[in-house]
Image: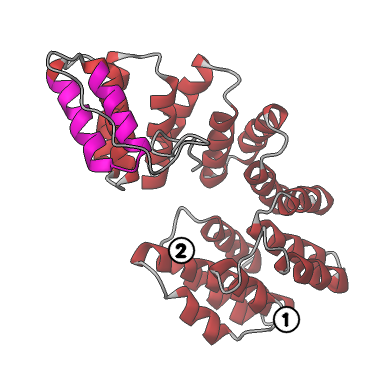
Amino acid sequence: MGMAGIFLLAAPGRSQQQEAPKPPSSGASAKDYVEFGMANGAKGDLNGAIEAFNEAITIDPKYAPAYYNLGIAYSVESRTDDAISEYSQAIQLDAKNKDAYYRRGCLRGKKGDLDGALGDFDEVIKLDPKYALAYYNRGHVFYFKGNLDGAVNDLDEALRLDPNSSLCHYIRGLIWHAQEHREEALADFQKSSGLNFPYAAFWNWITETEMGRRGAAAEDLLNALKSPAMFKPGDWPSQIGNFLLDKITENQLMLQAKAGTEAESQKRLCQAWFYSGILKHFTGDNKGAQDCFLKAIATGSTSSEEFVEANRAVAELQK
């Protein structure tokens, strides 16, 4: 799920070499310590930020911004459960903190708690009907839950608020594709690809190939792979693109998929098996394609769009 910018990113134009923030003086308030923590975070001192936010809570256990910012810090540390707990405390103290709902919803979605995520994004939209990212994320959750009409409605609204969201165009393209609206899907994939989202280039290739435009599909993908704004030499997305264009073998793709952390490997293997299945399907090897799709599903990478699409592909092949 998408996430908004966080305090730990240095402000534009701020020198990373500036002096360390000065600690609050004796008798400082919880607000002073939160500001001190945020300044530490902006400098990249995550431990200093966490210590400051905890000190703010010690001074005033009912100061909601301290819990909210502590949640952000824990999220950056990938302490997801701790971050959710802090956001929940912030919400308990300030039920109108739309950003706390939003961030908690993103983390709940990441953990697979789709119903919890939906509830949080519902609250964000009630508090701020113009919160584009909340519509995108709720639409994304609807996509994973199979509520495609609900997903399209939210993605349409997100795009009305932010027409240049590459992720909105990508997910809506997947939904159009699932509903066999090829022209609409292609338009969204091309828009997303034009906004430099690499996976949209793969689905542009898939959709054009299905429409009988094999030459155009290959040319478009080849051109996309040459875009430094979309692909970096040797990165994982470029490996998928090279595989689809028969520049590397399935075994080479799988070896690349297994590189990285366990979580990265799980998602990459899901993607690798999915695109292997697509390639086999296009060559008429439907049994081989189904085997690949089942292997993608077996990775358990439930937060991957390829996991959803592999399930959809298996259901289609078994008709």
- Relative to 255, is 167 above or below? above
Residue hosting label 2: 267
Q: Can residue 88 be seen in this view?
A: no
Q: Quadrant of the C terminus?
A: bottom right
Residue depth check, mark 2 versus mark 1: number of the one nearer the observer: 2
Taking the spot 84% from the left edge, 51% from the top edge, the residue there is: 183
Residue hosting label 1: 284
* Crowding at mark 1 (Cα within 10 Å: few <14, some 14-19, many 20+): few
Helix, strand or loop at mark 1: loop
Residue closer to the observer: 110 or 22? 22
Residue closer to the observer: 39 or 178? 39
Q: Where is residue 92 in the image (x, y as percent from the top left)?
A: 28, 17
Q: Which quadrant of the view contains residue 8? A: top left
Q: Which quadrant of the view contains residue 24? A: top left
As measured in the structure, the alpha-carbon distance from the residue carrying label 2 to the one carrying label 1 is 26 Å
Q: Where is residue 123 in the image (x, y as percent from the top left)?
A: 46, 21
Q: Mark 1 or mark 2, which is nearer the start of the sequence?
A: 2
User: What segment carries the magenta color?
Assistant: 32-58
Helix, strand or loop at mark 2: helix
